[in-house]
Image (cartoon, rainbow, N blue to C red):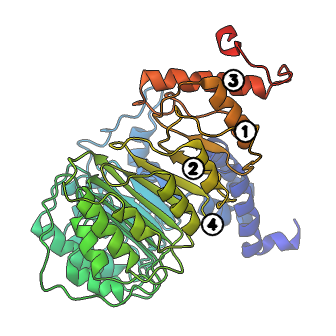
Amino acid sequence: MHRALLISEVLSEIFAHVNEELGPRLAGKKPSLEALARTCKAFHEPAMDLLWADLDGITPLLGCVPRLHRLIYPSGSKPLTWDWSEGVEPLSEHEAHQFLDHAARVRSLCISCSEDLHLFAALPIETCIFPRLLSLAFKVRRLQHKYLCLFLSPTLRRCVLSVINSGLKSLATRCAALEHLSLMVPGWARQSADDRTFLSDGVLLCKRLVTLSCPPLDWAAWKYLSGLPSLLRVSICEPRSASRWSLDPDTVNFAPFLNVTTLSFFVNTAAYAITVMQHSEFPSLKEFEMVADVLPCSEAEQLCRALSQCKAKQTLEHISITSHIPKVQEPSCNSLTAISQLLYFTRLRTVRLNLHHCIHIDNHVLLQVMSNWPHIRSLELVDSQTLPEITFRGLFTALRLCPHLHTLRIFMDAVNIDFDPTAEKFQHTTLQTLDLIQSDVADAEAVARIIFSVLPCINRILTRRDHWNDSLVSQKGWNEVNRCLDYLKSPAAVGGDIIGVVAKS
């Protein structure tokens, strides 16, 4: 054997390359690493480290204990059931050592079944089962979270939890290197006042957070995070059953979130997000997203105004604001105000506004939008409660200002055709995806000719197959447009005469 293969670092690099080449094909990865581990003593340790590095569940490791191996891998073809460990005695001290021999090799672990955790009941609470663990996803029932402390490694960098409780403080203190924390609380779970306190107390002890995803924080936690230089991404996910956040009239402005580049809110209403934005500055913000169940026009205006004042004019590139449930428009609402606040951001590349009674887009507004967003790549401006007023002429006039746009989704008046492709020579050669949603079509052939002449990279207009709630009438019209486009782009098209092609199709 070559002397280079006696160097453990060299072997680790070679085996890591083998592991990477096999990728997610676990069926092929395991036998290959097992074979390497059996080849010779020099290969054994680095191959075993990779073999046990990533685990989905602890059952394979428990199989290293002879008493449990017979239960996990029974003779015959009887499959292993999820409750195989029911009634099985916990690990003895000797069996725990057998388990820990291989557990030290694990780097990434996901636990989504809590039925086996009682096997660790006899271990001292200060035991660290996986001393070199880097990533942990602990998604088990609340009653089983008492075992979390056994999985907390001082090397842990990434942690995903499904329950908020007092154990968060232990996580923060025992895992000082923690950089990524995600609390994936189920949407139906009710967040109590104690949970919010536990969450805040835990976050206040995290000194090196880079990303944080969790339910709504209290103001003490926001104030702490605003001064945390390592923080780059924050995502707030509000459970559907959560009580409304009571706004604190004495809230003071936070220090600027100097390095946060991504901020997102998935909430029932926008009130919480608006208050956070009104008291914060994000001078490095590149991406902002908010999804609300209900977003009335007045709150959409407040949100956009707060966003425009967060000092991100020179950095913000992506905005996505959507709402799920239509709400009756307030009589005093100005549907132009919300979008006008966003014209402040001139470096935008992606904008998605999918709202109700909040944005009214016509040719003039679209031209204004395109004028202020010359770098835009993907644009979606949809309000299901307004009538389409953008015409082909207005669309093509605006497209001249956005040479990089490749995806567009809007409502449009495709019935009143005001553009003649034979008289006006213009082509936009970048646009590749055009979604006109529920717009009606009267003359499919004329619309197809216009699209074929002006938008050569558009092969088809998205139809009801892509949007389940589109009307059958509009679907039929756009299907006819797409058939005409297919013919125009085919070798059979001679002289541009496509009269009757729809009927023949």
Q: Is 404 placed above or below 175 here?
A: above
Query: Pointer 3 and pointer 1: residues touching (CB < 8 Å)?
Result: no
Which badge, 4 or 2, is on the more N-terminal residue?
4
Q: Residue at x 23, y 71 (%)?
A: 167
In the image, what residue occupies the spot 76% across and 37% down?
422
Cα distance in 3D space between marks 1 and 4: 26 Å
Pick whichever, 109 or 376, lies toward us.
376
The residue wearing badge 2 is: 394
The answer for how far apart the CA atoms under marks 2 and 1 are is 14 Å
Amino acid tagged 3: Cys
| Residue type pointed to by label 1 | Pro
Mark 4 highlights which residue? 375
Q: For this view, does 117 lie left or right of residue 479?
A: left
Q: Is residue 121 visible?
A: no
Residue drawn at 72 percent across, 16 percent down: 499
* Residue tagged 3: 484
Quadrant the N terminus occupies: bottom right
